[in-house]
Image (cartoon, rainbow, N blue to C red):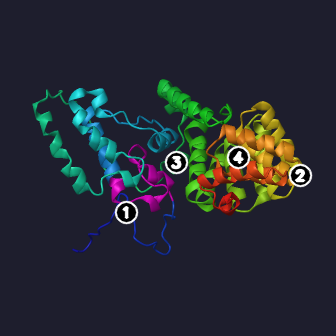
Amino acid sequence: MPDGIRLKVLDFGIAKLGESAPGAATKTGMAMGTCPYMAPGQWRGAKLADARTDEYALGYVLYELLLGAPPFPGPGVAEYMDQHRFREPVLPGARRADLAAFDHIIRTALAKSMDDRFPSLVDLIAALPACDRLDRAPRPRARARRVWAIDMVLVAATVLCARSPVSPRAEAALPAETATARAELDALLRRQGAPASPADCPHTAVVAEPLALLARAQLATSGAEVARPNATKAVELCPELALGYDVLGNVEQASGRLEAADAAYRRALELAPTYAAPRFNLAVLALRRGDAPLAVELLDQLVARDPSDAHAHLLRGQAQILLGHLTQAIADLEAATIGEPSEGAAWLLLGQARLKAGQERPARDAFCRARRLGMAEAEKLCAP
């Protein structure tokens, strides 16, 4: 290069190494991407990204080009995570009849499972000629708009939010948009059983709660150490956030740090005494420590509030077996199988309780049901 001229690479978009490089700044399992275009697998970590992830983003852009609007409106991190992972897009043909020929392409490109998408972009392109008849359809006047590039910035959106919280001036400038985003996020959290957002955390809905939700998803798919930074950051940003402490307790429990988990769950209950999740998790901890009476006491409170809570019945049934209270255990586990008939663990425990109670034929029926639901432990117990 001529003297005085230096080249700097500023951005690779999203680049994935075939093998982890020593000392890499981006941790394995980190969720990376631009929220509107992130495929379901990307929310669970970079390991689940490949060419079919690009296909998903391309399908998203194609949808925007066809209809002038995205398939998932967001607007925040938590909403995008929920929509990309669990909601199906309204197909183009349902919005405009002359775009129905694109329905198969959009449905396949935006499939939740990578295995249900086109095997390659070549296959996606090969499907496009079927849409040639669209040339004869009236074309709407194109609106001038900006289309985002498919290349994605190498940074988690939640980290950006944490470092750049919404300022009071910005909130005052966009009161309607802020109120709408917070209302939608609040509705999402309420559907998941979380308590109302604390009023004394001004940036809770736009920062702390999405971080807690992201940490919970990372814990389920990538492990405790991947989830820990976001869970910790959530409670640092809002020390009154019960959801954050419950998720942090789950992270600590998954790491084997039971005392820290106990403290986090109890803090969550102090902040929200009717919050069911940390009470249930304290019962799980009690069973891990062999304290079945405490587990039953905690679960009694949950069942009293919601007699249809199948998971509380299941865990209380397990505790009752340990205490030798077989009649109560069978009643709880039967309630669990009614509430969650596809829960193999409930059928397995029901078989164990019935067997201990001398009910051999009903026990075998329960074991066989557990085996059909994939419980390998029930294989021999189901034999005649």
**Residue 241 in view of the camera:** no
Residue type pointed to by label 2? Leu
Q: Residues within 10 Å of mark 2 (few under 14, many from 20)?
A: some
Quadrant position of the C terminus in the picture: bottom right
Overall secondary structure of the magenta section? helix
Residue wearing tag 3: 158
Question: Label 2, label 3: how many angstroms apart (C-alpha)?
Answer: 45 Å
Q: Measured from the top left, where is residue 21 in percent x and y?
A: 45, 74
Q: Residue at x 24, y 27 (%)?
A: 97
Q: Residue at x 86, y 43 (%)?
A: 327
Q: Which residues are magenta?
A: 30-54
Total marks shown come to: 4
Q: Is residue 49 magenta?
A: yes
Image-quadrant location for residue 219: bottom right
Of the image marks 2 and 4, the number of the one nearer the N terminus: 4
Say if 13 sits above or below 157 in the image: below
Residue wearing tag 2: 323
Under circle 1, the secondary element is loop
Under circle 3, the secondary element is helix
